[in-house]
Amino acid sequence: MRPGELPGRPPPAAGVSHAEKAEIKADVEQTLPLNSSGIVAMFEPQWTDAIDKALSGASNVTKEQVDGDSADEVKAAVAKNPPATTA
């Protein structure tokens, strides 16, 4: 596996520059240290309080707000390439 690739996922989009990939990688490494785990949750604003409560025991929570078009792109990418399941 090459840097920037995730297991069970296609390589990052060809339209993303090397500098952008490096920035994304640095952000992920800062937020998610080596040998740790994390989740990505996308939800509508009305669920913010419930999500905050559910994550209250987490050691580190990083939040980013995305626009609707970006959220739709992520949902479409996941639908096209669903995560591998474990038995």
Image: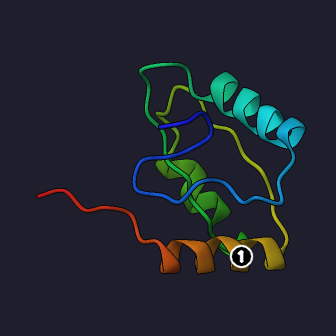
Depicted 72 relative to depicted 86: above or below: below
- In the rendered image, residue 28, in percent from the top left (x then y), is placed at 66, 33
The answer to which of 66 and 2 lies nearer the viewer is 2
Please give the name of the residue rendered at 49% of the width and 33% of the height, measured from the top-left corner.
58
Q: Look at label 1 and name its amino acid.
A: Glu
- In the rendered image, residue 41, in percent from the top left (x then y), is placed at 56, 59
Residue bearing the label numbered 1 = 73
- In the rendered image, residue 3, in percent from the top left (x then y), is placed at 60, 33
Residue most toward the left? 87
Image check: 43 left or right of 18? Answer: left
Dividing the picture into quadrants, the one containing residue 77 is bottom right
Depicted 1 relative to depicted 12: above or below: above
The answer to which of 56 and 5 lies nearer the viewer is 5
Query: Helix or strand or loop: what does disc 1 sit on?
Result: helix
Decide: few, some or many residues near mark 1? Use Cα within 10 Å; few <14, some 14-19, many ≥20: few
Dividing the picture into quadrants, the one containing residue 65 is bottom right
Please give the name of the residue rendered at 84% of the width and 39% of the height, measured from the top-left corner.
18
Dividing the picture into quadrants, the one containing residue 70 is bottom right
Image check: 82 left or right of 42? Answer: left
- In the rendered image, residue 66, in percent from the top left (x then y), is placed at 81, 63
Please give the name of the residue rendered at 87% of the width and 47% of the height, measured from the top-left corner.
17
